[in-house]
Amino acid sequence: MLPEVIERIEAACERSGRQPAEVTLVAITKGHEVPEIRQRVLAHGHRILGENRVQEWRAKAAALGPEVEWHLVGHLQRNKVRQLAGVHLIHSLDSDRLADALEAEAEKRGEPFHALLQVNITAEATKYGVAPRDAAALAAHVRSLPHVTLRGLMTMAAFSDDPESSRPVFRDLRRLGDRLGLPGLSMGMSADYEVAVEEGATWVRVGTALFR
Ligand SMILES: *Cc1c(COP(=O)(O)O)cnc(C)c1O
């Protein structure tokens, strides 16, 4: 339930000496139908939503209208960038070529894209994201693009029953963000968002916990 997730975010802030206003909950709605999203998310006054896939996002964005702030959190292919008008923040920028495609599209539209670099901290466990050692070069490239605004870093921890197993991953992302001068951090999902908040998350991406 969304109110409980908000409470838990606030408690994690309290434990770690942070302000709740520093943390934005992105309600991940993938796999859920529009009426359910209205009931479980929008009815609580929450308007910041995320989807994994462009196709699914477009259908829901059309149905839910302009009040929603949409985040795209899934792997993005270059041939989809033409369809991204209206996305507030892309969490999954992970290559120079994707950055260049976003730049070209944004320039054409005359409106910038805002993006996070997805970093593959746990190299063995997840498929997408730039390797930590390549993150500085990608950040420099994105910063050279006039129509793509770099807002921070994103990562996914390996799936585990123990949220503490995510802590070193989140800590590594925060250190990398410190080194690159990027305080914005998208990290933490249903299984580990409280740990992520304790470690400095500024966006948490929570889906399953909102719908059970
Ligand atoms: C599905 C998804 C989430 C949310 O995961 P839950 O475990 O359902 O909270 C977060 N981030 C990404 C990239 C996802 O695909």
Image: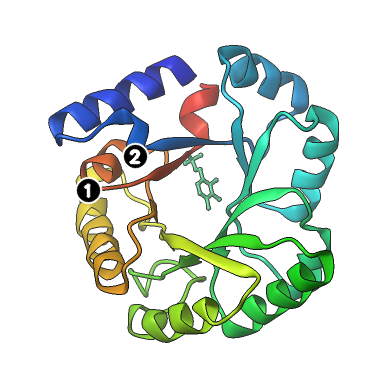
Residue shown at 42%/42% (left/top)? Answer: 204
Say whether mark 2 is within 8 Å of ligand 1. yes
Instruction: Inspect this view and state whether residue 1 appears.
Output: no
Above-or-below relation of 127 to 52: below
Left or right, 150 with reference to 4: right
Left or right, 137 with reference to 84: left
SS label for mark 2: helix
Indicate the amino acid at tag 2.
Tyr
Tag 2 residue: 193
Q: Nearer the viewer, residue 133 or 17?
A: 17
Where is residue 37 drawn, in percent x and y? 67, 24
Q: Nearer the viewer, residue 118 or 144?
A: 144
Tag 1 residue: 199
Q: Nearer the viewer, residue 68 or 130?
A: 68
Where is residue 98 drawn, in percent x and y? 65, 77
Indicate the amino acid at tag 1.
Glu
Residue 158, quarter of picture: bottom left
Mark drawn on residue 164: none
Dot 2, crowdedness within 10 Å: few (<14), some or many (≥20)?
Answer: many
Q: What's the distance in space between the residues labelled 1 and 2, CA to CA?
A: 10 Å
How was the colour assigned to the protein in this rendering? rainbow
Above-or-below relation of 43 to 127: above
Residue shown at 23%/31% (left/top)? Answer: 13
Residue shown at 54%/82% (left/top)? Answer: 144
- Marks 1 and 2: which is nearer the front? 1
Instruction: Inspect this view and state whether residue 153 appears.
Output: yes
Residue 168, quarter of picture: bottom left
Residue shown at 78%/38% (left/top)? Answer: 61
